[in-house]
Image: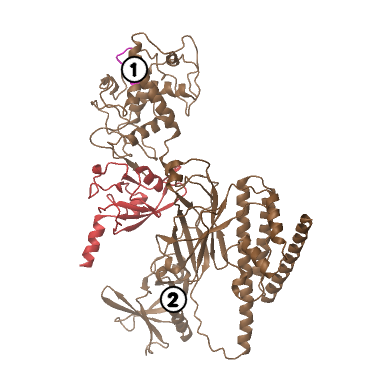
Chain colours: A brown, B red
Amino acid sequence: MPMDRYADMEDKLRILEDLNMMYIRQIALSLQDSDIQKKIDHEIRMRDGACKLLAACSQRDQALEAAKSLLTCNTRIMAYMSELQRMKEAQVMQRVAQRSSDAGPMDDRLPCKGKVAISDLRIPLMWKDTEYFKNKGELHRCAVFCLLQVGGEIHDTDMVMVDRTLTDICFDNTIVFSEASPGFELRVELYSCCSEEDYSAGSTSRKLASKLSSSLGRSAGKKLRVAMDPGACSPTSNGGGATLLLPVPTVAGPKYHLLAHTSLSLSHVQDSFRTHDLSISGNEECPYWVPLYGSMCCRLAAQPHCMTQQMMSGCLKVKQLGGDPQSWTNVYGVLKGTNLFCYHRQEDMEANVEPAFTIAINKETRIRASEKDPHIKAQSICISNQYGGEEVTHTLSADSREETQRWMEAFWQQFYDMSQWKQCCDDLMKIELPSPRKPALVTSKQGSLYHEMVIDTSDDISTVTDILTRRMQELELRSQLGTCPPWMSLFEDSPGGTRTPRLARHSPRSPHRLPHSPLSPLRCPWPGLLSSDASLTSDSDSPCSTSPCFRHHGWAEPLPLSSPSSHFRPRTLSLDAKLSTLRGRGYVGVLQCSCQPPSSSSLAPIPDQCVPQATLSCSSSTSSNGSSEGSHSPSSLDGTPFSRPSSARRSLRNLRAKLDPRNWLQSQV
Amino acid sequence: MSFIPGQPVTAVVQRIEIRKLRQGEHLILGFSIGGGIDQDPGQNPFSEDKSDKGIYVTRVTPEGPAEVAGLMMGDKVMQVNGWDMTMVTHDQARKRLTKKNEDVVRLLVTRKSLEQAVRHSMM
């Protein structure tokens, strides 16, 4: 029978929903505002879509995204409904006020609206050191996102997966609210959801059935709504009136919980990054818990319309005080931001020509209407500013009394706006519109200490090959005596074997770079090794450290190693390949590296000159004059065949440079 | 610009907003940085206090975005887009500046001339 009751409840819910929609439509109709109606309809459609998606999807990520959309839609619906109710109440109040003739002239000066943008949201985390450093056990992951709300406008950020390798939760989105009043309240809510629970339909329906077993009266409905946790804006907060309950459709799936919230207002607006406190709900016992440090860092900027839009424009006559009483200039004046721009003609303004002159209109400006000037028919307006220590006064006169009045009104409004928007009117704050997001590579780990310290994967092979080549050198010296480990054969030319002299590597290379037999004359035994050993051993270890033949700039003398060899067995992208190329070109390549133009990523310092010195390697610049700029291009070798460093070599170099404490790294950004 | 570990640092900073320039497939800022907590601070030619492991601007490309924005050689970078730069490794600093999805970096930098200017204006 419980399933029957469940279905019964579902029907009831559906009926309630329909009734609610009818109620909403009626209200909207009476308000003659179909705008909100449309928005609600749209959100309900979105919500249905999200529910269907949630029911249909099988993957955790999809389910989390769908649940996020669901939460956002619900919150929006609640917000619209409460706005609707508020409008209805306001209408009723107004009718009441109209009937009673007590309502005197209301001196309503409303401040202008503005754009408010929040960006670069970052929430630091505070993991227990035992969890963070030991990094043992399963990675407990949570999905988090932020809901940002100003008035009726609600936006959500993208979802971020949080686990204990993350030090901060970063939201890259820039969210812009276009019509905010100076008394805005930006509510930021952080929702999280544990991403490991089992959301099987059975358990959810059981939970739901138990919730629905009591009748869906007002109190139970309230409880249900709270349990579903839609967000800040609840219709009951309007006080009195009907509980506009739009029952949340029952869906199986991940559910987000409110983890932390905070409210930002005009006083927090600044043209730089600030840290704000978060109020955290929930505790360690909750499954959706993420250890927050307790603060949030973001950039909150505002652009009031009075700073970005033309508040008033028209033809004026301007005279500077102290000038010739007849020296009136006809200008086209535009009041925008903290300035009154005066153009010679209206066309100039449209053509973006520089204004003839500009009168400042800011907090320090004094404006008053002056007495009738006998020369002018109408009243004129005096604007006084302090430039330096001097007071400069301009007198404005419009064509008619009404025009003058309108200008005065515009100035008063501007002053009022500036007093309301306070610090936002000092200077125009920049707001970057969020660029259309490319299907971005999802960096699953962001801002993690570990991952910033991770050494390039290609470096791993390099370090291995280093060790091997070093060992080869030792063995080589030993092999003079005859002993030779079996794996040495890897590096021997297989006699008679033809091969395509090509390595399956990133870029095609010309064939004649593969090393000859490793057992070549001792005089130049391991140039490849020399490079590998460079910074790991100190300079004078290997016997050939100062061998001048490798310090030759001109490549005139063909190195024995670079003689063409065409009998190598085919290599694949494997350890063998790396080893052999490193050996064959290792040294040459490293010498070459000094002449590479730097890539834009972090570069190892490159020595200015490869002069024959006792210092050995050039991959880590151990020359005493410290490191050179990444952007220097030391004399390049013409016609060198090694013009493109492999990324392995480059990262090898990088790693060397990074690890060498004698360097003072510089990076080009 | 020296600091005592554990004590808050106060500095007179200037806000510099640099818009990255696209060059091919790279977004560049046009300057070079040196320093970091993993670097040898004694080799920093720009720092006053030779134990300062902060990030310093070692070179500014002429006509580059950084120069246009007012960055000068020898500046110490305190903050980048809200992230602290006084206690980071060299590589972390570089990464903070070269995030591919950011077009604008807002730096807080300090230099000796700023402190002097403030001191003079107060006298």
Between residue A494 and residue A457, name the one nearer to us. A457
Q: Is residue A398 above or below residue B74?
A: below
| Visible residue check, residue B100 | yes
* Quadrant showing the N terminus of chain A: bottom right
Q: Which residue position is annotated with label 1?
A: A474
Mark 2, Cα crowd under 10 Å, few <14 / some 14-19 / many 20+, is many
View extreme (left): residue: B123
Q: CA distance from mark 1 to mark 2?
A: 83 Å
Give the mark, 1 or 2, whose residue is nearer the N terminus: 2
Between residue A234 and residue A547, name the one nearer to us. A234
Asked if the stretch drawn in magenta spans residue A256, the answer is no
Chain at numbered mark 2 = A
Q: Where residue A600 sits in the image (x, y, percent)?
A: 39, 40
| Visible residue check, residue A343 | no
Q: Secondary structure at mark 1?
A: helix
Give the residue drawn at x 59%, y 91%. A101
Task: Identify the amino acid type marked 2.
Answer: Gln
Q: Where residue A622 sits in the image (x, y, percent)?
A: 27, 32
Task: Identify the amino acid type marked 1.
Answer: Glu
Residue stretch in magenta = A521-527
Chain at numbered mark 1 = A
Q: Where residue A189 sits in the image (x, y, percent)?
A: 53, 60
